[in-house]
Amino acid sequence: MDIVIKNGVVLTLNSSKSIFEKGMIIIENDTITFSGEEHSASIPQHSKIIDAKGGIIMPGMINTHTHVGMSLFRTLADDTADRLRKYLFPLEEKFVTPDLVYWASLYSLTEMIEGGTTTFADMYYFEDKVADAAVQAGVRGILGESILNFPSPDTKEPYGGFENTEKFLELYSNHPLITPALAPHAPYSLNMRNLKKTAHLADKWDIPVLSHLAEMPFEIKQIAEEYGMSPVELYSTAGLLSKRLTAAHCIYVNNEDINLLKASGTGVAHNVSANLKSAKGIAPVLQMASRDIPIGLGTDGPMSGNTMDVVNLLGYTAKIHKFDNKDRTVMPPAKVIEMATIGGARALHIDGKTGSLETGKKADVIIVSTESTAMFPIYDYYSALVYCASPRDVNTVIINGELVMEDRKIKTFNKKETKSEAEKIVMNIKKELGNF
Amino acid sequence: MDIVIKNGVVLTLNSSKSIFEKGMIIIENDTITFSGEEHSASIPQHSKIIDAKGGIIMPGMINTHTHVGMSLFRTLADDTADRLRKYLFPLEEKFVTPDLVYWASLYSLTEMIEGGTTTFADMYYFEDKVADAAVQAGVRGILGESILNFPSPDTKEPYGGFENTEKFLELYSNHPLITPALAPHAPYSLNMRNLKKTAHLADKWDIPVLSHLAEMPFEIKQIAEEYGMSPVELYSTAGLLSKRLTAAHCIYVNNEDINLLKASGTGVAHNVSANLKSAKGIAPVLQMASRDIPIGLGTDGPMSGNTMDVVNLLGYTAKIHKFDNKDRTVMPPAKVIEMATIGGARALHIDGKTGSLETGKKADVIIVSTESTAMFPIYDYYSALVYCASPRDVNTVIINGELVMEDRKIKTFNKKETKSEAEKIVMNIKKELGNF
């Protein structure tokens, strides 16, 4: 059934950032067929009418980097030094099964939908289970099986991720919501031969690439010692920098690295909250943005960023870069909302398909209610979204033309059953933790 | 009626940070008479039983620095350079009346209660109207009339704030919720004679002092030029540093300043979110905390920090100081929750009265629900509060033994009427802004 959204302010996030004060969106099948002022629309017959009740109608938010399968470890060992190698890898080895990944992913997707996320980029293990959960939830995903130089929960062989990716591709090709990707873990966890193999396969299979890049001080040191270059230069040498790649973090990048990112068309996933929490640093986002490198926002995994919504990242993104640049004018709210939507789509190289409310684009639309106490008064819509909104203000979510959440009720799967399954797994983890 | 809270985890925030897993709180009149495990309590007859439904029972949060009367300007001219002198002061001159201050304050108090704040420290104009709103709302307040060297909305005379303070004291002495304070605006907006006069009157009237201090680069420069000292040294010379004072911001403090703050017993209000948003900087909180200077959290005004809840400050506080100190272990969640509760009480010099759930303290208690999607799983309560909770998880608020919010419903005043009055004022401001 066609959907008409009316009685709200439309923030289009098109190239001229048009705002329609008495706006209307018309969706036919999976596509936006009208985005403009209500008075100039002709409403199709037999359509479902959604009343935005004076709220904000905007593109769904895009989470450009996460690991949704980790949600059941959230709040475990936060703030421990070197948690990655002391806790994360051993935890994953012990507990991560296809069953855990499915329910943990569906649990994360609950939170992502409730927070207005319509597309996510994910890299983890048993990624086909992440895909199953995303299809069940009705959320758009670019999903990659992790490829690493050591055994992981889903393969006994180093670099078994290649084989897993091939299997994943067979399961999910030409799916309206799921795009399989290659996911080389990081510069320090693949050798040069396999980095090059990844680049080669990406071209051969014509699929995107997701990777961690220039995230940690030890990474910079190790790559410098091993190759005499920066992680970004290494990826350039391996042929990985391209319009296929979305590189997560890019905290430690120099001017030459930024030139390489720019020249190659690589997208960047900026994970501000997780990067601060782990005391890693602040990516030079303004410097990269000034070169027109596509930048989106990412939560990182729920052990790193904790909450799975993009809304909570908006304030951090605005404030941190103002602080970091000692200038309150450099990161206005409109720029932040751009990163959360069309910027994210550009960083994932899918801006032809989604990221703005424009005729012809896939219908990934959310309504943000302005009824909560914090959302009044509103002198500026972008400012209210960035500095005042909570993920819980998101009222309605439409993805690929399908109504996924209406009036805070998820329509695509049973939220209660998902929590109950997640609880069983968490009880088991808690029981075993004593012996851990 | 006495109140019993059961079926929740009690975080006491006492000196040994005791946690009672099957905890109970008993309140008789305005006072906590039991805080411990349920099995060791004897429940008074005819008491109201509140079921925490497995949630977190903890001390109410303390907002150590704000300007609640500014809520109706929120999202106006965010991110403008030198907004204080270009927008704030002129806006206030034009629009700030007793009526606006009352409704704007009550509107802010809606949000503060909904976010679990039970005590706030405020400095503004027509502070008696802030007090009226706080009494109506049932929220504990330390409230100060601003004293400045130029005319302000509530006085045509420079330093008219002294006279206003005297009148305010007559209206609100020995009130169970309201403590009037002296509020010298800042080192740059009072001359030495009047800074000294403030210190003298604080002793004479035996009341607390609230002030901005060491907040801005221009302030440091101006005070150095005028007096050849730092703002903190200036306040020391004027006799203002003491156990009466809560100094907001303290971003630009050197070692000698920190020694002066420590020796005097001055409390510090840390406004992390507002300070980042205005690109001012990060106060050296760990350095001050290591000297045992009492530190609480503050939202600052709704034009500066935008949201009026302490919950949204928790994640910022944890993450920013880890980042600033390049060490993820230095600001564990328990330390952050301490600042939000008993630390805030210490910074306001009222820790004998509130800030923790201990027998004999005033009953300022909140229940944080753990039912939302982001609040699962919980391996660590402090971590869940700091990294996952939303102000909207706060379910129930008790202040001074009175039930102020139950199951998200405010009991002390009409929230709808408050919003409707606020809307009228905002419509008028929007109309006039064209000529502004």
Image: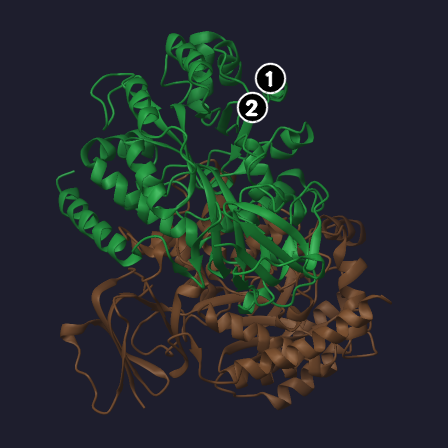
Chain colours: A brown, B green
Q: Is residue A293 visible?
A: no
Quadrant including the C terminus of chain B: top left
Numbered-mark total: 2
The residue where tag 2 is placed is: B266
* Residue B148: quarter of image: top left
Residue at 61% across, 66% down:
B54
Q: Are marks 2 and 1 on the same chain?
A: yes
With respect to residue A12, does A134 lie above or below? below
Q: In this view, does A250 lie to the left or right of A345?
A: right
Is residue A13 found left or right of B43 in the rendered image? left
Neighbour tally class for label 1: few under 14, some 14-19, many 20 plus, Cα within 10 Å: some
- Look at label 2 and name its amino acid: Thr
Q: Nearer the viewer, residue A248 or A222?
A: A248
Q: In this view, does B338 lie above or below A67?
A: above
Give me the residue at 47% from left, 37% from top: B275
Tell me if residue B248 can be seen.
yes
Give the left or right position of residue B313, taking residue B150 as reference. Answer: right
Q: Position of residue A361 (x, y in %)?
A: 35, 77
- Compute the Cα span from label 2 to label 1: 9 Å
At label 2, counting other C-alpha atoms closer than 10 Å, the crowd grade (few under 14, some 14-19, many 20 or more) is many
Residue A182: percent from left, percent from top? 64, 75
Give me the disc on residue B260. 1
**CB of mark 2 within 8 Å of CB of mark 1?**
yes
Describe the element under mark 2 as helix, strand or loop: loop
Chain of residue at mark 2: B
Residue B140 against residue B125 in the figure, above or below: below
Identify the mark at residue A132; answer none if there is no mark: none
